[in-house]
Image (cartoon, coloured by chain):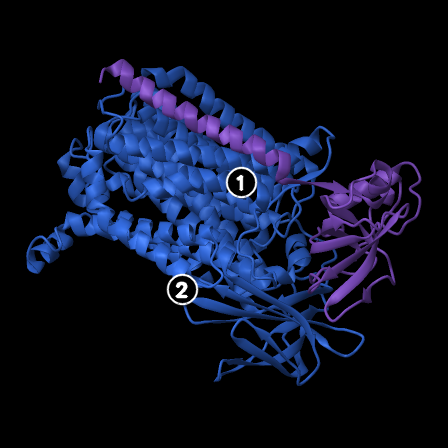
Chain colours: A blue, B purple
Amino acid sequence: MIAELGHFALVLAFAVACVQMVVPMIGAHRRDQELMEVARPAAIVQFVLIATAFLALMHAFVTSDFSLKLVFDNSHSTKPMLYKISGVWGNHEGSMVLWVFILSLYGALVALFGGNLPAPLRARVLAVQASIGVAFLAFILATSNPFLRLSPAPFEGHGLNPLLQDPGLAFHPPFLYSGYVGLSMAFSFAIAALIEGKVDASWARWVRPWTLAAWTALTIGIAMGSWWAYYTLGWGGYWFWDPVENASLMPWIVATALLHSAIVAEKRGALKSWTILLAIFAFSLSLVGTFLVRSGVLNSVHAFASDPTRGVVILAIITFFVGGALILYGWRAPALKAEGIFAPISREGALILNNLLLSAAAVAVFIGTLYPLFLDAINGPKITVGAPFFNMTFGPIMVPLLVLVPLGPFLGWKRADLVAALERLMGAGALALVAFICVMAFVSDAPWLAGLGMALAVWLFAGAFLELATRISLFSSPLATSLRRARHLPRAQWGMTFAHAGLGIVVAGVVGMTAWRHELVTALKIGESAKLAGYTLTLDQVGLREGPNYEAIVGVIHVREGGRDLGVMVPEKRRFPVEQQEKTEARIRTNGFKDLYVVIGDRNDQGAWTVRAYENNFAPWIWGGAVMMAFGGLISLTDRRYRVGAPVRARARIIQQPAE
Amino acid sequence: MTRKNRRAVFIFTGLAILGLAVGLILYATSSGITFFYSPSEIAQKHIAPGSRIRLGGMVEKGSVEHAGPATVTFKVTDFVDTITVSYTGILPDLFREGQGVVAEGNLQADGTFVADTVLAKHDEKYMPPQVADALKKVGRTRDGEMIKAPSGSTLEPSNP
């Protein structure tokens, strides 16, 4: 009954979205206030309906209602509650429902908090947002109905892929989708602006927080996925350049570019049409990501669907939205008048360089990801584009960008003095040099590149804080003055400092992990020891353990570092009888600077157990830095100016504007 | 600087970065990609030893042996040709005899294959798509039986 209600709500939501797509658009065209006002209640009703459907589906999973085909295929009554809930989006149909749920949530947020937007712009934004909803709701209802019944109802389900039964992964999709779908907001604003033929500072001010929110969620989502891959896949890699990972990285890169170009559009009125183009591309790449992951063209834990019609439908949706947006862009963009003349060496110029390099990086990732698929589609040779390709393309493009990151904020708007900016960065440069010398002098197995990489990381981190220090005139004025200045600094400023410093930490993590990773693969009998870097690992015993829906081989490994006893680590190898699968449970011991990563494998003929261990230097910094970047995004999102609105808006409405 | 000059600077920078990206991509495609072959393709195409490739096929039943402390050998087959693979390390969780596998590494002069990466990622049909395609090409099912026309339905495995 509840499932039917959910299905019905989904159909109703489709109808409401159709209305929301058409009526406000006509209203905005005719300047008809009443028709335009349809958009807000429609967006909220659409959200409530999709939320109902989503909850109905969740109810079916939580109560293990195996009369639903989806629950039967993807759940099991012995599964822990957390995974019953995450099972809702751990499959194709459910994840698409989550997709439209988040899409309608963003629409409802604009309807609720968009009080200070000009009415025609708001109506158009919500109409465009609804058109995306219409496409995906139609897709769900026509090809991936999550509420299909089975008759007779089976007693037990198939279970969820054990690899997905993991707390880290349970919340990875919601974050990732919040990011993907959040970019739809920037897209809707871009299309609405193109229809209006007008982009002003208030438009840019509205686009930025949505992009920022999407970017923050995407950053966390990607970091969670990478962290999950690190500790579940059993060999401690954090990034595989897997097409599915690239699918999330591409929108992230373009969203990063968009964040930066929107600043120029807001503050200087320049780069307007470029910002619009980036908004279109950012969401287009989200759609491409959805296609890659959901169509089954890729083979991974993400590819649930192998029904080719679904891929074709998503491809048609992409073609419609991307093609339509680009045609509209080609038609209307020339009408957007650029203001704000600036010299090449200026803040604007630096942000353009940032955008160019990020775009080039996105192109490299795009080609590396889609070239094999393209060759396959034309029956060419089967190839794999792996890490070497991306190291050779993405790396060299990113390095100049990273070198320039600390410089940009020191350049003034319009026209800047490069020499003066470099002089102010001398401190960071000196620290980077010290870092390089230290690495080369004190680390025995340090390649040149590792030293340079660490210097780059220090340059980024120190540069970010040096900029903050300059802004609050730390050292050059009394401490009290500096603190007062720090308090009054815009939150967006703090956000930038954290994001750029976090980037430095990520770089340090990646460099450390690449240059100083030690590996041990050996077979140990009970009581035998092996050495890895400074550690001594002793296999004390191996036992069996019953879990709620699995049985596990448990290795008890005693770890000593030098003379210190670090206690035991108990890696597991779990077997899931229902799903007929195995899953490695690595154990990781971290001290914040390095991880000891231990895995137990099978027993060989001589009765010895395969043990694999890694010393991953700086590994925790990769995710720590990513979290810091996301934190910067969050702080920036609380900036006062997003709540106050652009100064040209009517004052009366601003006062009622609730905080987000 | 005039408006024209300024624009020239931006266009030049843009083109330079575009050129850099294209150059890097072209350079990387010549050496950064790996080709996928089935055992019979390796036999036919006379792949030079030492080149880095991906080898895909089914793990022959009963062929998995422990050759050293942590080294495993197994045979990869497409039921026409068979290649012996050796690998040091822990095999992925999804690795099983009689199922699809993709091994990445180098072909040796003696015709064996030394893998440094073994992938057993697969879909719910327990077969990487490249392997499924490679088998289809030589006209075999996952159990090694000849496919009778029409081929589509026989490739469908019984539900595990």
Left or right relative to A52: residue B32: right
Q: Which residue corresponds to mark 2?
A: A442
Closer to the camera in the image, B73 or A55: B73
Closer to the camera in the image, A177 or A154: A177
* SS at badge 1: helix
Q: Which chain carries label 1?
A: A
Q: Position of residue A548 (x, y in %)?
A: 63, 74
| Amino acid type of the residue tagged 1 in the rendering | Met
Mark 2 and mark 1 lie on one chain; the one further toward the N terminus is: 1
Q: In which quarter of the image is residue B84?
A: bottom right
Disc 2/disc 1 C-alpha distance (Å): 29 Å
Left or right relative to A43: residue A147: right
Residue A289 visible to the viewer: yes
Closer to the camera in the image, A660 or A200: A200
Q: Would you place residue A126 above or below residue A229 in this image?
A: above
Q: Would you place residue A76 above or below residue A334 in this image?
A: below
Residue at image position (37%, 25%) is: B13
| Amino acid type of the residue tagged 2 in the rendering | Phe
Q: Which of marks 2 and 1 is in front?
A: 2
Q: Which chain carries label 2?
A: A
Residue at image position (33%, 17%) is: B8
Q: Quadrant of residue B64?
A: bottom right
Q: What is the quadrant of the N terminus of chain B in the image?
A: top left
Residue at image position (58%, 38%) is: A369
Q: Position of residue A276 (x, y in %)?
A: 37, 28
Q: Where is residue A641 in the image (x, y as percent from the top left)?
A: 20, 42
Q: Quadrant of residue A518?
A: bottom right
Q: Which mark is residue A392?
A: 1
